Image: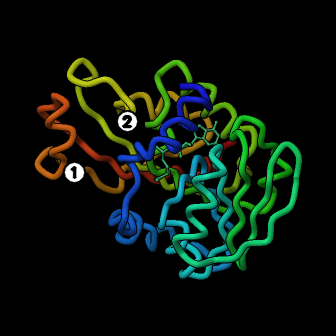
Amino acid sequence: MTPEFWLNRWERGEIGWHQTEINVHLQAYWPQLDLAPDTQVFVPLCGKSLDMLWLVSRGHRVLGVEISEPAIRSFFQDHELHPQMSDKPPFRRYVVDELEILVGDYFQLTACDLAEVGAVFDRASLIALPPGMRPRYSDQFKAIVPTTATCFLITLDYDQEEMSGPPFAVTDEEVSRLFSDRYRIESLASFDIIDDAPRFRQRGLTALREQVWQLQPREDR
Ligand SMILES: C[S@@+](CC[C@H](N)C(=O)[O-])C[C@H]1O[C@@H](n2cnc3c(N)ncnc32)[C@H](O)[C@@H]1O
């Protein structure tokens, strides 16, 4: 899953993952994290997710990273926002009020870029990556996200034999394998959503589970 793959998806407008409503699990479970309102929230592989605006509306500062510049331009246009743009090599930085988006490669972020981050919201990021890339994603995550930051993660699980990703199936065991060295992993909720996912049923799925996780930094580290 190269950057070109994603850039082409944006160019062709094939962005079936994009939600035109705020994510329901974010609204339902984020308050349980009980974060200070001004906490900066990192949104990896952010696309043009409306969830970033919801987080800002709750008082958070938001830092997104996205490889596609057209996606980010479209995001700001859609919401009639007029960001300041500057170069922050190897990124281009867009800032408007409490929202900052770095256009560039997640794998080029450094701990310095995320120094003020106090929480992470990952929806459709980990599951956008094929199995072979996920350890690299989580290694980079642990290298750049401050050790005290709490993470809110949404995954999908299904029989990978029935459909090819993205989105890819990520099992509970894999979440644990990727993150349990750093985080205490708590399942906040789990839903059978195949009846709400006709698009995936058409692609061959017979069952689909959506899982909401909180990853709490382990105190014993
Ligand atoms: C499945 S989409 C999810 C977008 C967003 N999280 C959402 O909920 O709508 C994955 C996004 O990651 C972006 N992406 C993929 N690889 C990336 C990378 N290495 N660095 C930054 N963004 C990347 C893609 O362009 C795409 O917008």
Q: Amino acid at mark 2?
A: Pro
Name the spot of residue 188 as percent of width and height, x first: 35, 56
- Disc number placed over residue 130 in the picture, else none: none
Q: Quadrant of ligand 1?
A: top right
What residue is rendered at 65% in x and 67% in y? 62
> Is residue 189 placed above or below 108 in the rendered structure?
below
Asked if marks 2 and 1 touch (Cβ < 8 Å), the reply is no
78 or 99: nearer the viewer: 78
Say what secondary structure mark 1 lies in. strand
The residue shown at (40%, 43%) is 14
Residue 19: give x, y in percent of width and height.
Answer: 37, 59
Q: Where residue 12 sits in the image (x, y, percent)?
A: 46, 41
Callout 1 crowding tier (Cα within 10 Å): few <14, some 14–19, many ≥20: few
* Disc number for residue 167: 2
Look at the numbered disc 2 and say if its residue's Cβ is closer than 8 Å to ligand 1.
yes
Q: Amino acid at mark 1?
A: Phe
Residue designated by label 1: 191
Q: Residue at x 75, y 69 (%)?
A: 95
How dense is the environment of label 2, judged by Cα within 10 Å: few (below 14), some, or many (20 and up)?
A: some
Query: Is the C terminus in the top left, top right, bottom left or bottom right quadrant?
Result: top right
- What is the C-alpha distance between the residues marked 2 and 1? 16 Å
In which image quadrant can residue 134 be found?
top right
Q: Quadrant of residue 80?
A: bottom right
Residue drawn at 81 percent across, 43 percent down = 110
| Number of numbered labels in the structure image | 2
SS for tag 2?
loop
On the image, which quarter does residue 150 sit in?
Answer: bottom right
